[in-house]
Image (tube, helix red, strand yellow):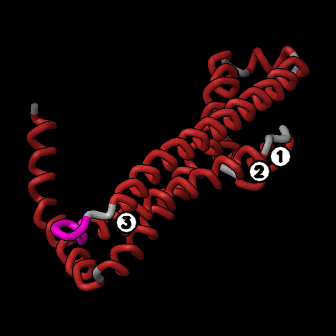
Amino acid sequence: MQAQSKNNTKFNFKTFIGLINRIHPRYWQLLLGFFLGVVATAMQLMVPGIAKGIINSIGHSMDVGLIVAVILLFVFSTIIGAFSGSILGFFGEDVVYKLRTTLWDKILTLPVGYFDQTKSGEITSRLVNDSTQVKELLANSVPKTATSILQLVGALVLMLIMDWRMTIIMFIAVPLVLICLLPIVRQSHKVARAR
């Protein structure tokens, strides 16, 4: 009996994708929101390269065009990022609405015996919490993870282009600092738990 319940609770990716496709979500919203998020991230990654030119020109003739370019990049990346968030938000709410409607229609067709055997809290959890978690996964977690990876890789490439020696020094120094800080962090956790 326990093995059967474990199999029922195990996550099945194929079933999950089938469920999402069954409610016919607007994938164009997901793709557009993701694309705009990538564009906003790419624009933010361009700022350090331009800022390098501004810093190098200090003491010489100041290039106003570069300053304007940095400001415009910040403004446009913020606007595009906001559009991306809005589109992904609409996509997520559409998924939740369709998923809850599908689940509710299914609940209405279930026999009365099902409600005798199943707790009402479990049904409510499936209807409310689980559909919200699907929305969070599709509309927030996946796009944010992808843009974060892009930001990390882009920043690493930019650092190597700007000064590869300094980048190597940083990659050696950061783990050493973390290793030194680890005992302090553990000790502070012990003190916090003791309180």
Marks 3 and 2 sit apart, C-alpha to C-alpha, by 42 Å
- Tell me where the magenta segment starts and ends, as one range: 55-61
Marks 1 and 3 sit apart, C-alpha to C-alpha, by 43 Å
> In which quadrant will I find the N terminus?
top right
Q: Which x, y percent locates residue 156? A: 38, 72
Q: Is residue 18 magenta?
A: no
Q: Which x, y percent locates residue 91? A: 70, 37
- Crowd class of label 2 (few under 14; some 14 to 19; many from 20; radius 10 Å): few
Q: Earlier in the sequence, mark 3 or mark 2?
A: 2
Q: In the visual, does 103 lie left or right of 153?
A: right
Q: Are marks 1 and 2 in contact (CB under 8 Å)?
A: yes
- Please name which of the two marks, 3 or 2, marks the residue nearer to the observer: 3
Location of residue 44 with respect to 53 vertically, above or below: above
Given the image, on which type of amino acid does mark 2 rest? Ile
Q: Quadrant of residue 161?
A: bottom left
Classified by dominant secondary structure, the portion drawn in magenta counts as loop
Given the image, on which type of amino acid does mark 1 rest? Asn
Q: In this view of the protein, can residue 35 be seen by the observer?
A: yes
- Please name which of the two marks, 1 or 3, marks the residue nearer to the observer: 3
- Crowd class of label 3 (few under 14; some 14 to 19; many from 20; radius 10 Å): some
Label 3, on which residue? 50
Label 2, on which residue? 17
Give the residue furthest to the bottom. Answer: 165
> In which quadrant will I find the C terminus?
top left
Label 1, on which residue? 21
Q: Which x, y percent locates residue 94? A: 74, 31
Location of residue 40 with respect to 156 vertically, above or below: above
Q: Are marks 1 and 3 in contact (CB under 8 Å)?
A: no
Q: In the visual, does 63 lie left or right of 22?
A: left
Given the image, on which type of amino acid does mark 3 rest? Ile
Marks 1 and 2 sit apart, C-alpha to C-alpha, by 6 Å
